[in-house]
Image: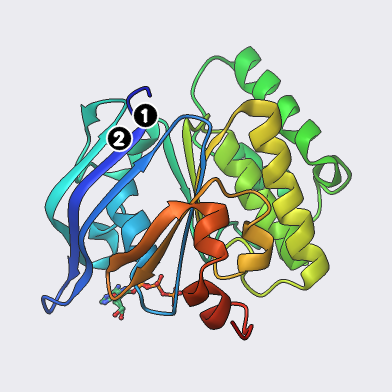
């Protein structure tokens, strides 16, 4: 098998007082794969994405040890701007969009590269993926539904041309129908663009439709890893996340 697009080795992320949120995690994500990380509140999922994407410092945290490689290049601890240059883009759990700006302004505020023509072309391509955007260009993003805001956040991220798109809790606070819409869109992105996704998600039912590999995080480490179908059918996941008797 080819070298993974993302290789994480022994990654440890800690915050101010020394508390360790991510404890020596190893993770490989291959090109075109959808990798799911699930776990209870406080397990360290967001901190893992922050540690990979260069956002630990902005939360008064730090990558204490370990390595992050993208396409074989060591990018450990690099700031978000550099990570975007390497094709790593994070759609955060909250504040995905600017609520007081219009939908169009949100998209134009994305730090896109390239000349005017290529930026226009990319914007058209992204808008065509999410048809509701075209109809709502002049509406403040705060007036979109929760699901549409999630999709706008994902659309903004696509303008940065990610090789690896990391999405933190896409389903947070959404109704079941909105969750389905968001995950259908992610599914289409994977199919149409061969996108590589690393998603943190508590909604196991939604995520299992698109995940190839899954990791269950407990107290900063991966307690269970493997093909998504096996992990999501495991006793631990069925009992803890789906409330099913096994
Ligand atoms: N900015 C921060 N400063 C200090 N500690 C933090 C910070 N962010 C997270 N932590 C701590 O790190 C640990 C892991 O938190 P993290 O947000 O990564 O977990 P999570 O699995 O994403 O949780 P959730 O599902 O609730 O979002 C927790 O103990 C949390 O209190």
Residue 11 lies, with reference to residue 186, above or below; the image says: below
Q: In this orientation, which residue lies closer to the viewer: 30 or 52?
A: 30
Residue 237 lies, with reference to residue 57, above or below; the image says: below
Residue under numbered circle 2: 82
Label 1 secondary element: helix
Residue under numbered circle 1: 85
Within 10 Å of the Cα at label 2, are there few (<14), some (14-19), or many (20+) other Cα atoms? some
Left or right of residue 181, residue 159 in this image: left
Q: In this orientation, which residue lies closer to the viewer: 212 or 157?
A: 212
Left or right of residue 127, residue 108 in this image: left
* Render colour scheme: rainbow
Q: Are marks 1 and 2 in contact (CB under 8 Å)?
A: yes
Q: Residue furthest front?
A: 246
Q: Residue furthest right?
A: 135
Q: Residue at x 59, y 82 (%)?
A: 246
Q: Residue at x 80, y 32 (%)?
A: 128
Q: Residue at x 61, y 67 (%)?
A: 204
Q: In this orientation, which residue lies closer to the viewer: 17 or 35?
A: 35
């Amino acid at each position: 098998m080819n070298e993974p697009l993302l290789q994480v080795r022994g990654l440890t992320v800690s915050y101010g007082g020394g508390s360790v949120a991510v404890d020596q995690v190893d993770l490989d994500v291959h090109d075109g794969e959808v990798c799911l990380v699930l776990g209870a509140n406080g397990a360290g999922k967001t901190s893992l994405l922050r540690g990979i994407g260069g956002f630990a410092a902005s939360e008064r945290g730090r990558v204490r040890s370990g390595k992050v490689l993208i396409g074989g290049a060591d990018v450990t601890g690099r700031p978000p701007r550099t990570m975007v240059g390497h094709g790593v883009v994070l759609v955060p759990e909250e504040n995905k969009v600017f609520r007081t700006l219009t939908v169009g302004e949100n998209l134009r505020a994305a730090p896109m590269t390239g000349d005017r023509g290529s930026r226009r072309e990319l914007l058209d391509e992204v808008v065509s993926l999410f048809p509701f955007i075209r109809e709502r260009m002049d509406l403040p993003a705060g007036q979109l539904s929760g699901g549409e805001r999630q999709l706008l956040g994902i659309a903004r991220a696509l303008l940065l041309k990610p090789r690896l798109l990391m999405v933190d809790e896409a389903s947070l606070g959404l109704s079941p129908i909105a969750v389905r819409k968001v995950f259908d869109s992610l599914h289409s992105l994977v199919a149409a663009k061969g996108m590589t996704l690393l998603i943190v998600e508590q909604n196991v039912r939604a995520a299992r439709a698109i995940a190839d590999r899954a990791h269950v995080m407990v107290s900063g480490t991966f307690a269970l890893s493997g093909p998504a179908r096996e992990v999501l059918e495991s006793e631990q996941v069925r009992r803890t996340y789906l409330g099913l008797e096994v």
